[in-house]
Image (tube, rainbow, N blue to C red):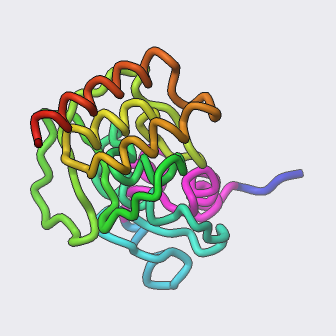
């Protein structure tokens, strides 16, 4: 016979699928009050990571935690890993981003101070431009390459991503061809 589910157990259930993280909105949706969140933080059963973002310490850390943290930090459900960070996550380029890049919808505005290590982009993505990687919403490899083309990532890194994506199937042949044309057109404009 199972006993009653505690607030921490509710949060842990959410956090297991989110690299140990949970937002206050998710907590409230699951029946956990703000008062209970505050009490769990005071008792060190929960760690406050940022405004409205918490870590459940019982969930083991992973190398991808910082990516999930950046996605959840915005508080917007459509947020996904993007641009340089997505290209890095897909492992099709030697790009080494200095920030974690995420994309939110064009209409979204963030009223608080953006952490120095985050790059926030505004773009309305189509459902087919977003997928999942390591349990984190992320733009497709083709979308990441396009974003990197538009944001000025060096051509050699774009070319590398196109070449490396061929055997992986992450980018279709037709998308690779279209992206190659865009890359070459950009290269000609820069010359």
User: Residue drawn at (41%, 20%), measured in percent from left and top?
Assistant: 177
Question: Vertical placement of 80 versus 62: above or below?
Answer: above
Q: Is residue 44 left or right of residue 150?
A: right
Residue depicted at 21% across the width and 52% down the height? 120
User: Is 184 situated left or right of 145 in this image?
Assistant: left
In the image, 161 versus 170, the foreground residue is 161
Q: Position of residue 115 (x, y in %)?
A: 22, 69
| In the image, farthest residue toward the front | 191
The magenta stretch spans which residues? 5-34
Rendered position, 55 above or below 125:
below
Q: Nearer the viewer, residue 162 or 126?
A: 162
Left or right? Give the position of 39 relative to 123: right
- The residue lying toward the viewer, choosing from 130 and 187, is 187
Q: Position of residue 94 (x, y in %)?
A: 46, 58
Q: The C terminus lies in which quarter of the figure? A: top left
Outermost residue, bottom side: 43
Residue 36 visible from this viewpoint: no
| Residue 30 placement (x, y as % from top left) | 50, 46
Figure quadrant of residue 48: bottom left
Q: Quadrant of residue 98?
A: bottom left
Give the overall secondary structure of the magenta segment: helix
The total number of labels drawn is 0
Q: Is residue 127 above or below residue 91?
A: above
Residue 114 in the image: x percent, y percent?
Answer: 18, 64
- Please tell me whether residue 7 belongs to the stretch shown in magenta: yes
> Vertical placement of 168 versus 151: above or below?
above
Residue furthest to the right in view is 1
Q: Is residue 191 visible?
A: yes
Magenta-span inclusion, residue 65 = no
Residue located at (59% from left, 75% from top) = 57
* Viewer-side residue, 10 vs 61: 61
């Amino acid at each position: 016979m199972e006993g009653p589910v505690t607030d921490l157990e509710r949060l842990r259930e959410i956090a297991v699928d989110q690299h140990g993280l949970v937002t206050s909105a998710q907590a409230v949706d699951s029946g956990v009050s703000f008062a209970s969140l505050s009490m769990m933080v005071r008792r060190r059963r929960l760690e406050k990571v940022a405004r409205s973002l918490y870590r459940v310490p019982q969930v083991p850390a992973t190398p991808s935690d910082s990516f999930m943290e950046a996605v959840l930090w915005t508080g917007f459900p459509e947020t996904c890993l993007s641009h340089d960070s997505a290209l890095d996550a897909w492992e099709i380029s030697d790009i080494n981003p200095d920030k974690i890049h995420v994309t939110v919808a064009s209409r979204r505005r963030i009223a608080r101070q953006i952490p120095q290590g985050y790059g926030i982009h505004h773009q309305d993505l189509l459902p087919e431009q977003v997928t999942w990687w390591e349990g984190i919403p992320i733009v497709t490899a083709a979308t990441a390459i396009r974003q990197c083309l538009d944001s000025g990532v060096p051509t050699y890194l774009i070319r590398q991503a196109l070449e490396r994506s061929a055997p992986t199937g992450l980018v279709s042949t037709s998308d690779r061809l279209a992206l190659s044309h865009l890359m070459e057109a950009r290269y000609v404009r820069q010359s």
